[in-house]
Amino acid sequence: MWITPIISCILMFALVDSRAFEYVTSPEDHGAKGDGTSNDSNGINAALNACANQRLPCRIVFGMNYLSGPIILRSSKLTIEVTGVLRMLKKHDFPNKDTALSFINCTNGLSHIKLTGGKPLENMII
């Protein structure tokens, strides 16, 4: 019967997770320790750079305790999901002390950037 393939097809589409259509990563996937004491700037910026090389929307999950210098957003359609803690290094600990960067910086022309999580603004200690 032709009804069975239609029902199977409907069930298949109903079970597809929307995250299958986005690139999901974390700073630890790119070398960050997330222990709250190590400088995770390189791992965080590597995750952001990986998102910039994707054609899909990107989600970076910050689920641990991160310490970072300036981070640079380089891609549109980016979701930063902070369920852990993202804390800024003291200015004198920045890799390049002469750089006049804010904690979170964007390249020109970006759009559709979201900051989400349980309490993302409380978890971002600046």
Image: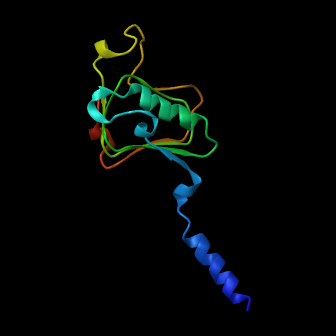
- Point out residue 57 in the picture as x, y percentages from the top left corner: 57, 46
Q: Is residue 62 above or below residue 32?
A: below
Task: Identify which residue is drawn at 55% across, 25% down.
Answer: 107
Residue 43 falls left or right of residue 8: left
Residue 14 falls left or right of residue 120: right
Comparing 103 with 40, the one in front is 40
Task: Identify which residue is drawn at 26% across, 33% down.
Answer: 36
- Point out residue 83 in the picture as x, y percentages from the top left corner: 33, 46
Q: Is residue 105 above or below residue 28?
A: above
- Point out residue 126 in the picture as x, y percentages from the top left corner: 29, 28
The number of numbered discs placed on residues in the rendered structure image is 0
Q: How is the image coloured?
A: rainbow
Residue 104 appearing in the image: no
Q: In which quadrant is the N terminus drawn?
A: bottom right
Image-quadrant location for residue 53: top right
Q: Is residue 15 above or below residue 76?
A: below
Residue 72 falls left or right of residue 11: left
Residue 6 appearing in the image: yes
Comparing 65 with 86, the one in front is 65
Q: Residue furthest top?
A: 98
Q: Residue furthest bottom?
A: 1
Task: Identify which residue is drawn at 40% across, 7% down.
Answer: 98
- Point out residue 109 in the picture as x, y percentages from the top left corner: 60, 30
Image-quadrant location for residue 43: top left
Task: Identify which residue is drawn at 36% across, 28% down.
Answer: 40
Comparing 123 with 32, the one in front is 32
Q: Residue furthest right?
A: 2
